[in-house]
């Protein structure tokens, strides 16, 4: 499945009464998460609502974690604000994506995660249509509304993404598992790729689909 997935279809499938809003990519201007971090800084404490739509090209890594209680409070406040409070439990998990050399935890709604896992391999490019829902404990809380898989191209020698990770507990090289993701975490953020992981990765860049 390589076409854009409509969130309304994925999320509302298990909740017939949920409102369905036609997806319009024009509502999601291209803007990086890095730019929004600077333009929309988060306070050190408390829940802050933002509800900013945007799109950015990332790479899929696929490490998963449960959405923390603090971040879920932001999601709940956001879904109430947009008039769909019953949707909050569907954002129970977050997955890792990278933008440049920074890994980000992004909440993915129930029903959409399985499609991402089927469509993508570690390191694949993916265009995310996102919402900056708000802030929790000083960090932005991102959520996926929809995604689109562009044509994959080989990684270039100067590509910032470092994909080669050692096999851990049977996990495939190139997939960030719980241990790698743990090394990268800074609070609720996955944080930039740091020296420990770069050293373990051997600074090797895999060329994909060569």
Image (cartoon, helix red, strand yellow):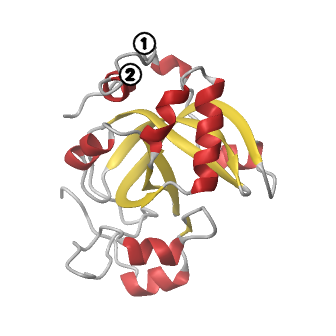
Q: Where is mark 2, residue-wise?
A: 8
| Towards the viewer: 165 or 162 | 165
Task: Point out which mark residue 199 bears.
Answer: none
Task: Give neighbour class at mark 2: few <14, some 14-19, many 20+ (Cα, 10 Å).
Answer: some
* Secondary structure type for disc 2: helix
Q: What residue is drawn where x is 60% and y is 51%?
A: 71
At which x and y percent is residue 51? 65, 31
- Identity of the residue drawn at 18% across and 55% down: 209
Q: Nearer the viewer, residue 33 or 168?
A: 168
Q: Name the residue at 51% across, 36% down.
A: 88
Q: Is residue 33 visible?
A: no
Q: Residues within 10 Å of mark 1 (few under 14, many from 20)?
A: few
Q: Earlier in the sequence, mark 1 or mark 2?
A: 2
Q: Which residue is mark 1?
A: 22
Residue name at image x 35 percent, y 48 percent? 125
Where residue 184 appears, x then y in whole percent?
52, 73
Do the numbered discs 1 and 2 sit on residues whose CB atoms are within 8 Å? yes
- Seen in the picture, residue 32 relative to 12 is either above or below; the reply is below
Looking at the picture, tell me which residue is in the foreground, 139 or 151: 139
The alpha-carbon separation of the residues under discs 1 and 2 comes to: 7 Å
As drawn, is 142 to the left or to the right of 20?
A: right
Of tags 1 and 2, the one toward the viewer is 2
User: In the picture shown, does residue 154 fall above or below 79?
Assistant: below
**Image quarter of residue 17:** top left
Classify mark 1: helix, strand or loop. loop
How many numbered marks are there? 2
């Amino acid at each position: 499945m390589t076409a854009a997935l409509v969130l309304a279809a994925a999320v509302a499938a298990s909740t017939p009464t949920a409102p369905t809003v036609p997806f319009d990519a024009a509502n999601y201007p291209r803007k990086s998460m890095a730019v929004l971090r600077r333009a929309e800084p988060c306070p050190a404490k408390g829940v802050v609502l933002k509800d900013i739509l945007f799109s950015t090209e990332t790479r899929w890594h696929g490490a998963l974690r449960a959405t923390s209680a603090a971040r879920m409070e932001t999601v709940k406040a956001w879904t109430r604000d947009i008039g769909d409070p019953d949707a909050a439990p569907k954002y129970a998990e977050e997955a890792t994506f990278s933008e440049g050399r920074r890994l980000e935890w992004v909440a993915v709604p129930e029903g959409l995660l399985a499609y991402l896992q089927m469509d993508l391999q570690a390191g694949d490019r993916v265009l995310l249509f996102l919402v900056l829902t708000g802030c929790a404990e000083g960090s932005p809380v991102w959520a996926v509304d929809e995604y689109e898989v562009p044509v994959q191209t080989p990684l270039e020698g100067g590509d910032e993404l470092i994909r080669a990770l050692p096999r851990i507990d049977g996990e495939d090289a190139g997939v960030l598992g719980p241990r790698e993701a743990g090394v990268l975490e800074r609070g609720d953020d996955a944080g930039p790729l740091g020296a420990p992981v770069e050293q373990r990765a051997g600074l090797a860049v895999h060329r994909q689909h060569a």
